[in-house]
Image (tube, rainbow, N blue to C red):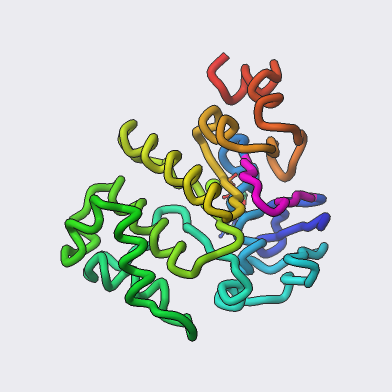
Amino acid sequence: MNIAVYYGSVKAIEDVSFNVNQGEIVAMIGPNGAGKSTALKAVFGMVPLHSGDMLFDGSSISALRPDEHVPLGISLVPEGRRLFHSMTVIENLEMGAFNRKNGDIKADIENILDMFPSLKEKRKQKAGVLSTGEQQLLALGRALIQKPKLLLADEPSLGLSPVYVDVIFDKLIEINKAGTSILLVEQNARMALEIAQRGYVFKIGGIFMEDKGDMLIENEKVKSAFLGG
Ligand SMILES: Nc1ncnc2c1ncn2[C@@H]1O[C@H](COP(=O)(O)OP(=O)(O)O)[C@@H](O)[C@H]1O
Ligand SMILES: [Mg+2]
């Protein structure tokens, strides 16, 4: 740990250490531009480390490409969903499974659709015509096709209607109960801390606080800065 990431010569995060224990939901909250997405991208190999090291199941993952994380059991729900808008719901799910070598992908896709009934009805529709909330469910479903041990999610509730924000958070709880650990970056700090066992609070360039989720919700500094007083 103790990772640093630079964009060119500009430091984005420095001296950042965090961990996710098996079975946990861990939240990362904090102001815009603090480096939360950068930290998540570093875990998934989307940005190179300037220094530090990251371990998963005891082995270093610091030098891996994003696609090399997936077979280890790490999947990402990227910020902004990054769906293939001209492809159907099913095709997007198939894309999530494209590098899977084992198992019955068709059956797994059906299982995902059973988890998300609103997508099941729209399985032949193009992703681009879905509502934002449905698109977010699809992005989540696409990541779950890989049966990850660790799910990384960057702002999964951003831009969603309140109803879908609740749906997404309920799904994250369900996914976690089924055995997947989750590292969750969220603007919706209160809801994130409510479902998380632990949280990290970022300031610009790094982490300045770590505690149990319920402790952070009660913390006066966190309350006034991120939970609306
Ligand atoms: N691709 C990039 N190129 C250059 N700078 C970037 C890039 N992505 C993020 N940054 C900068 O890195 C810092 C951290 O950004 P980010 O990790 O997106 O923060 P957060 O997710 O907490 O809002 C910001 O100053 C941001 O402008
Ligand atoms: Mg971000």
Query: Where in the figure is residue 151, as x and y percent of width and height?
Result: 56, 57
The chief SS type of the magenta part is loop
Which quadrant holds the C terminus?
A: top right
Query: Residue most toward the bottom?
Result: 101
Residue 22 in magenta stretch: yes
The residue at the point 30 percent across, 45 percent down is 133
Query: Where in the figure is residue 228, as x and y percent of width and height?
Result: 53, 18
In the picture provided, is 140 more to the left or to the right than 161? right
Residue 39: name its quadrant. bottom right
Which quadrant holds the N terminus?
A: bottom right
In the depicted view, which residue is nearer to us: 18 or 121?
A: 121
Vertically, is 215 above or below 91? above
In the depicted view, which residue is nearer to us: 212 or 47?
A: 212
Query: Where in the figure is residue 182, as x and y percent of width and height?
Result: 59, 51
In the depicted view, which residue is nearer to us: 100 or 177?
A: 177
Vertically, is 134 above or below 100? above
In the picture provided, is 106 more to the left or to the right than 150? left
Q: How many marks?
A: 0
In the picture provided, is 103 more to the left or to the right than 65? left
In the picture provided, is 172 more to the left or to the right than 121? right
The residue at the point 56 percent across, 22 percent down is 227
Residues in magenta, as a range:
16-28
Query: Where in the figure is residue 172, as x and y percent of width and height?
Result: 48, 46
The residue at the point 78 percent across, 51 percent down is 14
Residue 139 in magenta stretch: no
Residue 28: name its quadrant. top right
The residue at the point 48 percent across, 85 percent down is 101
